[in-house]
Image: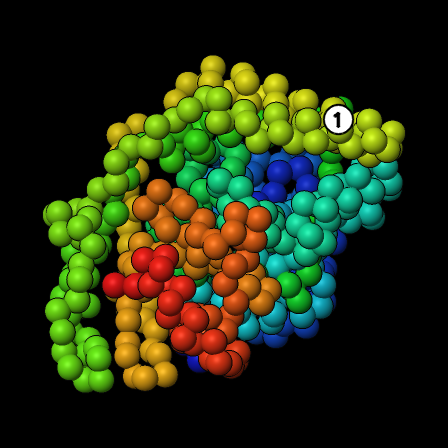
Amino acid sequence: MKNSSQTLISIIIPAYNAERTIFRTLDSIYKSGFPKDQLEVILVDNNSSDETNLIAERFPIKVIHEGRQGRSIARNTGSKQAQGDYLFFLDADVYVEPGYFEEILKVLKRTGIGAVQGMIIPSDVDGQEGINQYRYRTIGEGTSETFCLMNLMVRESPMINSAACAYRREAFELVGGFDEALERHEDIDLARRVSYGGYTLASAEKARAHVIYHGEGWPSYFMRSFADGYTKIDYNRKWSLPQEWQGMEGDDEYLTQHEFDNGAEVEVSIPDFLKKEKVKSKKKEKFNRLNYVWWALRDLTLALVGFLKTFESFYLLLFINHSFKLTGRVLGPLRKPRHFGKLIIPMAAADIRLKKITLKNGQKYFLKSTLRFVLLRRSLYVIDMNGHKILSGDSTMPNFFSYATFHHLGLFEEFKGDKDEDMIFQLLKYMELLQ
């Protein structure tokens, strides 16, 4: 099915009435510099009634039709038709800069990486200057000018934004692709499942994509924020269900097969949750509706304070926008639940999930098996999926760990430096990250 002699990437574009933007999207792909003989482009027409398909036919792409409405459905349909080992997802209002695909692949090909996110920058090509200036500033301030949403550390992050991203096919298929029951926030959900499954999420900030706002003025922008808040309940309800982590029944054998302490084979301490049964379970997290609106209420307050201090129109618009989002979150619990039972999370093979470090004295240690890693620039986030805790020595410094700290994991071959290794060991031991 795949071309075994070449690296083939598949670019999947869900499209619904995208005649205003689809030419720029497709044109940027073929002008990106990526070898055309290693490129597969699939446009999934999701019931367009305009000239989207006529424009798409001007390019050497595959057009398929998906009658069930929904961007997650369209993306999954495209992925089933794709032949590449690497699945790229682009929205029909996004265009990429030259070198985008090469920069993503540099990171995605590294050991254990499951998904990669580049920079996504609001574009000003649509003539809606006021909205675009607002979007640029909002995203820039929220991501420390990285324009990478993985830089946002909130409860549901890290986020691989499906507007422009890439997944290793094996990781995408392991967890079953996008959740078609989620109307929004499906990209945060997919990234979290891939991360929990044992793959590392990463950014490639030399890969730059631009997104065009395709709405009609401020009313549609604010209503989008309302919809974002209103549908967030679906994601939160899903992740408050009891979880079953499947595929870890061989971990104890895998761990005890490895040598420790300069060649002396020892019995490795296995976490209690690994000893329970073949299908591992995680207790249901309590869902608190007050916590559900907290982030929106906090953002609303900060916007009001900013306006009272500066009287800038930006903060007034920010306040209005957060008011719509907060209203959506308050009304969200009225939605009917879409997920029931248990949340099944398949786990990748042990050699992908279980990370081992080697100290200067030759001692080797496995890190705690519930840890998951997110690479961002020259730092990384460490998440304990048992409780979804973001680990940090200081709550104000989520980027607590440097690449030097974890270059032993085999993920950071190009980064050197272990002068602080003794400190690293004490840090890991103190935080109970070593087995």
Frontmost residue, 360 versus 33: 360
Q: Is residue 199 left or right of residue 206?
A: left
**Which secondary structure lies at badge 1?**
helix
Depth check: 211 or 17 in front? Answer: 211
Residue picked out by circle 1: 304
Tell me: residue 419, above or below residue 243.
below
| x, y percent for residue 93 | 69, 46
Tell me what residue is drawn at x 38 percent, y 35 percent: 239
Say left or right for 270 vs 137: left
Q: Is residue 169 among what the camera can see?
A: no
Examine the rendered structure and indicate whether residue 194 appears above or below residue 344. below
Q: Residue at x 68, y 27 (%)?
A: 300
The quadrant of the picture occupied by the C terminus is bottom left
Q: Is residue 11 above or below residue 91?
A: below
> Residue at image x 31%, y 54%?
370
Q: Residue 104 at x, y = what percent?
A: 57, 66
Q: Quadrant of the N terminus?
A: bottom left
Q: Is residue 358 above or below residue 312?
A: below
Visible in this render: residue 185? yes
Q: What percent of the width, then of the height, locates residue 82?
A: 46, 58
Q: x and y percent of residue 114 in the render?
A: 43, 61
Other residues around mark 1 within 10 Å, as few (<14) / some (14–19) / many (≥20): some
Q: Quadrant of residue 364?
A: bottom left
Residue shown at 72% from the left, 63% from the top: 97
The image quarter containing residue 61 is bottom right
Q: Nearer the viewer, residue 66 or 319?
A: 319
- Residue type for callout 1: Leu
